[in-house]
Image (tube, rainbow, N blue to C red):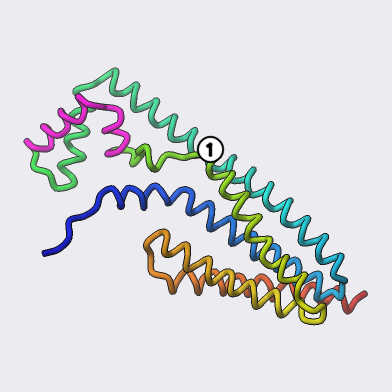
Amino acid sequence: MSPEPNHRQDAGAVERIGWLRAAVLGANDGIVSTASLIVGVAAAAQGRTEILIAGGAALVAGAMSMAAGEYVSVSSQRDTERAALDEERRQLAAAPKAGLAQLASIYESRGVAPDLAMEVARQVSAHDALGAHARAELGLSEITTARPIQAAFTSAVTFSAGAALPLVASQVAPMPLVPPVVAAASIIYLAVLGAVGAWAGRAPMLRPIVRVTFWGAVAMAVTAGVGAAFGVAA
């Protein structure tokens, strides 16, 4: 006998999507951007103090930039959602019967028999007509709605945490080995991040791990090459 679906767990997984996206993006950017900068500065034959200053500045500036960017982006998404809900509210107030027929047709298109679709539409509309249309027609619900402050805070915190990892590695590694140590440690951090993100989102792990480690390695390699070129030129 197959186990019954746990709808509460499914809803929790959907609810995690918003903050999980911001968290993974923030941590990934923190690791890649800061590690790339540190590797570039170290490859340019700069000292530990210069590396610390550059990495610390990248951490603070990046966290603020991520928070501001996420807030603006998700606020725009929230404004769009609100505008769509306002328009739906106006349409329902002006033509409730047409809204009921539209809702029933949506249920029919998903495989519900016509008579049952109309009955379901009547019952859910009697309880919350706008909410029913938001879910069925617009794909909006309480657990998926945009939350700008949550996204901004999550991005800033996770960027800072990600940026701190290569920064710490650069301060404990011997100076001649800073570039390879930071690069290797960052690849490991990115692999762990990809695995955690996949686990939290209940997705297969291999593809996210390969994706984040590959592009992180590319970014660090390019930056190291630029840093080495400037170092030679100096």
Magenta segment boundaries in residue numbering: 115-136
Q: Foreground residue, 77 or 45?
A: 45
Q: Position of residue 202 (x, y in %)?
A: 37, 62
Q: Is residue 179 left or right of residue 200?
A: right
Q: Foreground residue, 201 or 99?
A: 201
135 in magenta? yes
Mark 1 highlights which residue? 76
**Mark count:** 1
Q: Is residue 200 left or right of residue 105?
A: right
Q: Foreground residue, 61 or 87?
A: 61
Badge 1 marks a residue whose secondary structure is helix
**Residue furthest top as drawn:** 94
Q: Position of residue 74 (x, y in %)?
A: 53, 41
Q: Residues within 10 Å of mark 1 (few under 14, many from 20)?
A: some
Residue 207 vertical placement versus 75 (above, below): below
Q: Three-letter amino acid code at disc 1?
A: Ser
The overriding secondary structure of the stretch rendered in magenta is: helix
The quadrant of the rendering that contains the C terminus is bottom right
Residue appearing at x 44%, y 72% in the figure? 207
Q: Position of residue 174 (x, y in %)?
A: 79, 79
